[in-house]
Image (spheres, helix red, strand yellow):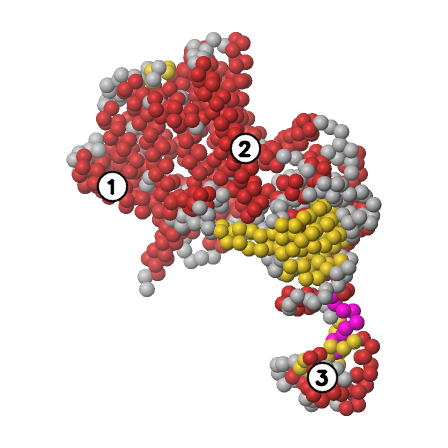
Amino acid sequence: MTERLSSPLARYFEIYRVQLKNNFVREAVYRTNFLTSIIVDLVWIATEVTLFSVIYANVPVIAGWTQSQVFFFLGIFFASDALFTTFFQRNFFNFSDLVNKGDLDILLTKPIHPLFLILSRWMNLTALFNFFMGLFIAFHYAAPAGFPGGWKWLLLVFWLLVGLCAAILLRFAFAVWIFWTDRNWALVRLYYQFFAFATKPDAIYPGMIRYLIPTVLPFAFIGSVPARALLYGLQTWEYFALAFVMLGFLGLNTILWRKGLRRYQSASS
Amino acid sequence: MTKLSDSTSAPVIEVREVSRSFQSVQKKPGFRGALGLLFRPEKTVHEALKKVSFSIEPGSFNGLIGANGAGKTTLLKILSGLIPPTAGEARVLGYEPFLRSIEFRHQIALVMGQKAQLWWDLPAVDAFDLLRAIYEVPLPIYRERLELLAELLDVKRHLHTQIRRLSLGERMKMELIGALLHWPKVIFLDEPTIGLDVLAAHKLREFLREFNLREKATIILTSHNMEDIERLCSRVLILRSGELIYDGEPTGLTGKEERRLRIRFLQRPSLDELSECAGIPKEQIHFTHGTEAESLAAHLSVRQGQIVPILQRLFARFQVVDMGLEEQTLEAVIQRLYEQDRIQGDSRP
Amino acid sequence: MNTALDWRAATLKNGFRDATAYRVEFFSDIVGSAIVPAAIQLVFWHALFTLGGATEVAGMTFTDMIHYTIVSVLFSQVRGGDQDFELGEMIRTGTLSNYLLRPVSVVEFIYLRGAAPRFLIAGLSLILGLILSLWLGGASPVRVCGAMVMAVMGNVIHYQIGAVLSTMGFYWEDAYSMLMVKNLVVSILSGELLPLNLFPASMRWIWESTPFYLYVFGPTQYALGRWTHLEFLHHLGIALIWMLGLWFLIRMTWKIGIRRYLSLGG
């Protein structure tokens, strides 16, 4: 056996580097995909922008949010969502196949944490375009939205990471049920239906619903909370709620993953 | 848990009274079915392995055969650490497989003929690069190994071709390379020749034999292709309904001494006459059925040394039209074995 | 005897069975996809009228908006179906060849198979609509029935457009992305996310120049009595023209596409 000198962290970095390279090569092979996927992304952005433009053509303010502020939110939301799409979306999409067809077997024999292999395998680097579009929109509407800018842009990095983590934790909580059912697209669709709520700033939701859907299920953490935090700052309790809900989901996901894996191993023949 | 030394005499795999039962759950359709599964599942228990014991020497090439559902894949999964046994104990390289320690995973490989681990849209070499990173093979050693494996399997020119553009045979070869790049000490091959044409299967076998001889890796292979077993394995384990019913050399199964003698007579003799004349029990004689011409032929199971005297006696008494000698094929033996009861006093070492 | 009708009936039945094999998922899916856009709408109106204190937006009161939202749900579930994606996928992967050997029109076969569950939904929505109209008293049953006819025509038009876009698959591997673009545009221009009269006058041409408003906005307007019978007939005529024009367009693009498909060896 060969000597392995590198630290675990270095090893994981090396694997991620190779995965990144491989995905880049794969996408370069399908160049036409690049253009079409950008078109789809642009149209998606356009529909969301149109929706708000039409409403703001009739009223100046919705629930205290001006048009610029909503567009600032949309920019952050698009950027955060694009990060998820780029690095995780397809891995979750393929997760059910991995379990159903038993391809997870091979991954379990590798000397690496299987979840790392599962979640790093597929990327969609083309979606980074949307990330930059989102940032562009956020930058463009920052000043009219009342965002002070300057060093506070650094906070954006933090909030984008929060948004990404929230999306991963949520999507995982919806995907992991595949261990118990052989068709979980009803759940996946439920995820996207909830996700539709996240495409609007949480301030417009009436009290009860706002705390139920976007906070307990942290869909609001993807875009609304970051935008609100940057524009107005959060109340202290909201920071605690954020940490509490995220850690709660992390714990829940860990338990479900372990239980699911055990079930997978007891059911497979 | 003590780690075994690398001395050649100590077995590399030890399986003691391993049993495995499954609870298959009846699932009703829909989300409600899924919920029901979670809270009050209805289970039926199925025993896939029943008190299986054996041990395997380092560097040996072993065949594992059995009909579909006999428990082959289950055994491989237990040995590679994918699932735990419900009872009994398995040790591979001194490790308990199901703990799946990093060290253990570094030293084994599992290849499943029906499950691909390579990327469809990428050339094989990119997938190998990933496996290099996963198993931390130093670059110079990696290049050396890849060179050697590609050479042995004759796929050097395909390394930079997208996997999807390769034929099934070439793809399987790539899967093998991917599984061997970390030079595993124990290799589990689950039906590696499935779906391959005769030539591709042959090439793959040649390679496996060569690799086993050169690198002294221990190999366990399951297959439905008896040629795989005959050509490669010095030892064969046969499972039937989860029980180990044979453990020994493949030649012990075919009974190299035994021959089938086919004789066609001008007129069909009676069974008694034939048995008496040939001097063999009636059970070893079978008349063929079918058309009139076919019913004139008989099959006799005889020992190698008896052939000439028996023929002489038969020629003297009957008018023989035609005759032939057939060797017992492993395939036929296995087929009978699957159907038969457990072999009494099997030839376990 | 009547084979032309037979295969169509069989196709509908088959598609219906397929869609409802998992009943719970089927209905939870419908309810989910009906409630989510409606809930988002209601949230908007709540934010505009209750929080924002507006009394009228584009000539509509809070009650008007809520009526629109509830009634539009009846029609938003009739539109849709992903058959055009199926058709595009068949063209892309080459499984189309299996269907070309059959003695029926592939385009129609795929439509009917996918539309079967939509017809069921249309029936259920109609019953629900009639009950609602009697209960609310505002809309006459005639209007509800007429509106549903328009919604079903919208379903056909939706597929026709999809089928035309699918034929791009004969030339282009990524044709499905055009179907996604279409669906995104439909989601806003059909009126299922907001009443189209919220569009400022300068932007009206956007939705008026597509047939998408005939899917949800049109039927809702008529059912709620905001269109006169004459206006309704006018738009019904427009729907017919779209259907006819698209029918010719499909025949053309399909013929050209198939020729290319076959010449490439299927």
> What residue is shown with label 1?
C128
- Viewer-side label of 2, 3: 2
Q: Is residue B262 magenta?
A: yes
Q: Amino acid at mark 3?
A: Arg
Q: Residue at x 79, y 83 (%)?
A: B310
In this rendering, would B53 be left or right of A2? left
Q: Residue C217 lies in magenta, yes or no?
A: no
Mark sitting on residue A254: 2
What's the magenta region? Answer: B253-263
**Cα–Cα span, label 2 and label 3:** 73 Å
Residue at 49 percent across and 27 percent down: it is A248
Cα separation, mark 1 vs mark 2, equals 44 Å
**Residue C189 lies in what quarter of the image?**
top left
Q: Which residue is mark 3?
A: B264
Secondary structure beneath label 1 = helix
Question: In this image, B273 relative to C188: left or right?
Answer: right
Q: Nearer the viewer, mark 1 or mark 2?
A: 2
x then y, percent, for residue B136: 73, 34
At x 38%, y 45%, the residue is: C24
